[in-house]
Amino acid sequence: MATLYFERELVELKDKLAKLLDSSDTTTTKSLITKLKKEIVKKEKSTYQNLDAWQTTLVARHPKRPGTTDFIKTCISDFIELHGDRHYRNDKAITAGLGTLDGHKFMILGHVKGSNTTDNLKHNFGMANPEGYRKSLRLMQLAQKFNLPILTLIDTPGAYPGIGAEDRQQAESIAVCLREMGILKVPIISVVLGEGGSGGALALAVANRLLMLSNAVFGVISPEGCASILWDNPAKAKQASGMLKQTARDLKDLNIIEEIIDEPFSCAHNNPLLTLENVKAAIIRHYLVLSKLSPTQLLAQRQKKFRLIGRYK
Amino acid sequence: MTSWFEKLTPNFLHPESKKVSIPEGVWHKCPNCKETIYGKDLKKSLKVCTTCGFHFLLCATERIEQLTDADSFKELYANLTPEDPIKFVDSKPYPERVKMAKRKTGLTEAVLTGDAKINGRLVSLAVLDFGFMGGSMGSVMGEKITRLIEHSADTNQPLIVVSASGGARMQEGILSLMQMAKTSIALNLLKDQHLAYISLLTYPTMGGVSASFAMLGDVILAEPGSLIGFAGPRVIKQTIKQDLPKQFQRAEEQLEHGGIDRVVKRGDLKDELSKILDYLTANIQ
Ligand SMILES: [Zn+2]
């Protein structure tokens, strides 16, 4: 599962190399090792160069891809998690709290998918219920009250489609986030780390700066969902993914995001630390610009940006 | 979320819904109780089944005719029409689908916007049309709704939006999704000026439309039997692998769960809207 279909040959080569390095007979294997290493470099290039939309989607969903939890562990000091929507329960699909990034104090919120099966279930695979969005809004408004900038990290297949979620008004909980984020008087920076699944992702993305990792995706519907509507066949997701234009490059071309944050050549899941370093640097860079704006300027910038989105004749 | 509308239970879709007027001399079969109704009677009953009370789908022009004073509707932003921002092609290219929808409905997009009078009071009115690509929201709907909100603020006039939509329009990709944010943010303008916004939900109001302007009314009304929710029933069923409760996501059920203010029969809508606006405007400025 952790090996994607187009990585198989590369992984085989790497396994072969590991075995050779383990073997004791160094004199006869030495030339083999050199040859294999060269082969691996070449293979890496052909594997990760020009990923198509579907491969990018799989990379964006990779279980080893760094997410909100990794970001907080690696880049944030003095993190104090805050819980609950004050009405129903604490939604673990979204982690939120106070944290310091390179000396700057932030309110941080992000989807958490979980990194193994137990964890996935605990966090509901990053699919929030209404209480998750209500917790987010509560804490974003708290941030405004105490003049703290807001950082949101996006990584979700979407809002949870369930009976309880509907009964507790999933649609309303998202809509209110969208409306209220539009008038928050503090800087908001959002980074799509992995998957940005439709409304459930957008509910955390009404930001002054929307950034995306180079292999993240963000779209109106999942390729599987699109394929099942168009062809009654979720297996045609690969075909749909190409049509939906959901990669970071696509969103940059459509003027939806401000910046693409580079991942290491072999993708985030093969080098999480370097990836998170890049994310951190980008956030700080944008924050330093936004921190100089007045509340009025921040609102004007954010509102104008969303007001202008759309193509029509 | 989004455009699962094409898979809506067929017995709730009514073929006549796309036509501007009901052919009066023909018999219609109620999709709910299967009784037949004479066209003339169906029109007189505002397209509500005279036997069981089932509310047939209305197209936008029928809705406007029923809700507003005769000839008071003055359309705004009628010239806006979609582009093809992501060159989406399924079995047909997106521009081809738009052209078909235009031909079928006689509309230029899935929403009509304009000024109208309700019992003599001027309001800004938007009416979505489910017959136009499932009432889906793309750039044009987002822009028209946003302009209408701004128009309400400029003219100091209450806003009424009648929703009927499967959600965001996937053929415009991320641009459709972003219309949710655009329209929702714009609604802050009305709050600042204490201008009333009444949202009327009809069959169906789902996905990107319910998760933006539709669920943000100061007062939210719904027609009986309307399907109202975020995720479509099919998606939920597939996810939880259980059957759904019989009345799941219906207006009556949503009233019980506290998601909407009132369920109002079609025949009472105009007067209710008018009375609610009386209250919400009486003590302002
Ligand atoms: Zn009937």
Image (spheres, rainbow, N blue to C red):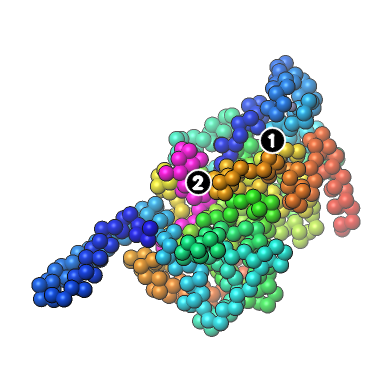
Residue A235 in sight here: yes
**Can you tell which quarter of the image residue B275 is in?**
top right
Question: Where is A154 relative to B166, above or below?
Answer: below
- x 17%, y 70%: residue: A33
Q: Are marks 1 and 2 in contact (CB under 8 Å)?
A: no
> Where is the C terminus of chain B found, in terms of image quarters?
bottom right
Residue B125 left/right relative to A7: right
Secondary structure found at label 2: helix
The amino acid type of the residue labelled 1 equals Ala
Picture coordinates of residue A178, whole percent (x, y): 64, 59
Secondary structure found at label 1: helix
**Can you tell which quarter of the image residue A304 is in?**
bottom right
Q: Chain of mark 2?
A: A
Residue under pointer 1: B60
Residue A293 in sight here: no
- Mark 1 closeness class: few <14, some 14–19, many ≥20 residues within 10 Å: many
Picture coordinates of residue B173, whole percent (x, y): 51, 49
Q: Is residue A228 magenta?
A: yes
Question: Where is A94 relative to B46, above or below?
Answer: below
Disc 1 C-beta below 8 A from ligand 1: no
Q: Which residues are magenta?
A: A208-235
Q: Is residue A1 magenta?
A: no
Q: Chain of mark 1?
A: B
Find ligand 1 in the image and state its quadrant: top right
In front here: A53 or A135? A135
- x 71%, y 53%: residue: B216
- x 57%, y 29%: residue: B103
Residue under pointer 2: A225
Picture coordinates of residue A230, whole percent (x, y): 48, 39
The amino acid type of the residue labelled 2 equals Gly
Picture coordinates of residue B80, whole percent (x, y): 60, 42
